[in-house]
Image (tube, rainbow, N blue to C red):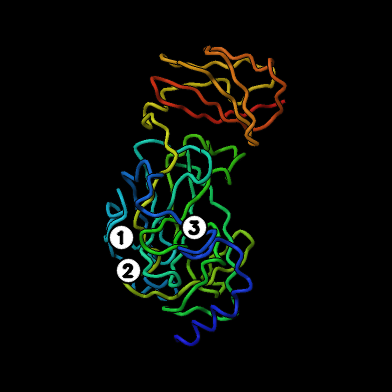
Amino acid sequence: MKFFSVFFLLSYTVLAQFSPIVGAEDCIAISMNSPLFTSWATKGTVKRGWVNCADTTLGKVTYGVVEDCFGVPNPAVLSLGDGGSATLEFQHTLFNGDGFDFAIFENGFDDYFLELAFVEVSSDGENFHRFESQSLSPTNIQLGTFDLLQTASIHNLAGKYPSQWGTPFDLNDLLGIETLDVTAVSHIRIIDVVGSIDPTYASYDANNNPINDPWPTPFESGGFDLDAIGVIHQNLLSVAEHKQELVFPNPIALNGVLQIKSPHLVGQIKLMDTLGKTYAFKNSYTLHLDQFDLKAGVYILQYEILGKLIHRKLILNE
């Protein structure tokens, strides 16, 4: 098996095109000790997956509890099993800032034995949207339980990096989705990738390619092992406080008048388009959009309340 694993890695090195292993040039992994992290998950739920989805008589995994995913990465983890999922929440919502916005931690013990998972986010707890992932791993031979993966052949899948190194995600990838407010993400869902290349059980990337990762993992701790979710860009209002703020109408016409309902609005108000261009308004509860040559599309409205910076998605229509 070891010979096969090494051969497998060498056979598709030429296909690798994404961020490489920890320590290599251009690696995007983020250490759990990075000062970038401002908070961690505080609550959540889990839906257990099978020990082996090809043999459901083995039952579902049992290792860990969802509380093991709260706070900073630690030795305790939550095993999801084949196709299992965990949905985590935070004291404050996340927003789409510059660069990566959060990172997922798994407990992989080296750079090549990896267990993968899809990542989805929601701003209402009901509509979840998945990051588009890619797997360039060959699919002609099934990876076995302890076989190896090439990190640089994986993109936008959690579990890409070993223990204590987070796989980062950028909410900018999900801009323009009507039912997602990237300025107020409240839930992150992690869904185990079933690594089988058998179409009966396979999980597929955004290009409809089966994702080949070590499978089966027929243990009580099988599947993706979720350790923690670190937040990089968080709104400083709590989720409850954020919901009390009201910006209307939204969507709004290009020549419309925007109202901000807030008891303590201070400072300059900014409107930013998806290309980063910024339009500044004077401090006012009423904004006349026709003073700028705006185009229809998705914008981010930024304003300050009691020293806390608020971000809201705003949709402008013709």
Q: Nearer the viewer, residue 241 or 15?
A: 15
Q: Earlier in the sequence, mark 3 or mark 1?
A: 1
Q: Foreground mark, 2 or 1?
A: 1
Q: Quadrant of residue 199?
A: bottom right
* Secondary structure of residue under mark 2: loop
Q: Is residue 233 above or below residue 30?
A: above
Q: Earlier in the sequence, mark 2 or mark 1?
A: 1
Q: Where does residue 148 sit, x and y in percent of width and height? A: 47, 76
Q: Where does residue 104 sit, x and y in percent of width and height? A: 42, 54
Task: Check disc 2 and report the residue beneath it.
Answer: 221
Task: Check disc 1 and report the residue beneath it.
Answer: 77
Q: Tell me, yes or no, whether the two marked residues, 3 and 1, touch with CB atoms within 8 Å.
A: no
Name the residue located 59 percent from the left edge and 25 percent from the top edge: 271
Give amino acid for label 3: Phe
* Secondary structure of residue under mark 3: strand
* Secondary structure of residue under mark 1: loop
**Left or right of residue 165, residue 76 in this image:** left
Q: Where does residue 295 sit, x and y in percent of width and height? A: 71, 27
Give amino acid for label 2: Ser
Residues packed near mark 1 inside 10 Å, few (<14), some (14 to 19) or many (20 plus): many
Residues packed near mark 3 inside 10 Å, few (<14), some (14 to 19) or many (20 plus): many
Q: Calculate the distance from the C-alpha at mark 3 to the C-alpha at mark 1.
A: 17 Å
Q: Tell me, yes or no, whether the two marked residues, 2 and 1, touch with CB atoms within 8 Å.
A: yes
Q: Is residue 262 above or below residue 201?
A: above
Q: Quadrant of the C terminus?
A: top right
Give amino acid for label 1: Val
Q: Where does residue 302 sit, x and y in percent of width and height? A: 52, 26
For residue 8, which numbered disc appears in the image? none
Q: Quadrant of the N terminus?
A: bottom left
For residue 118, which numbered disc appears in the image? 3
Name the residue located 62 percent from the left edge and 39 percent from the top edge: 176
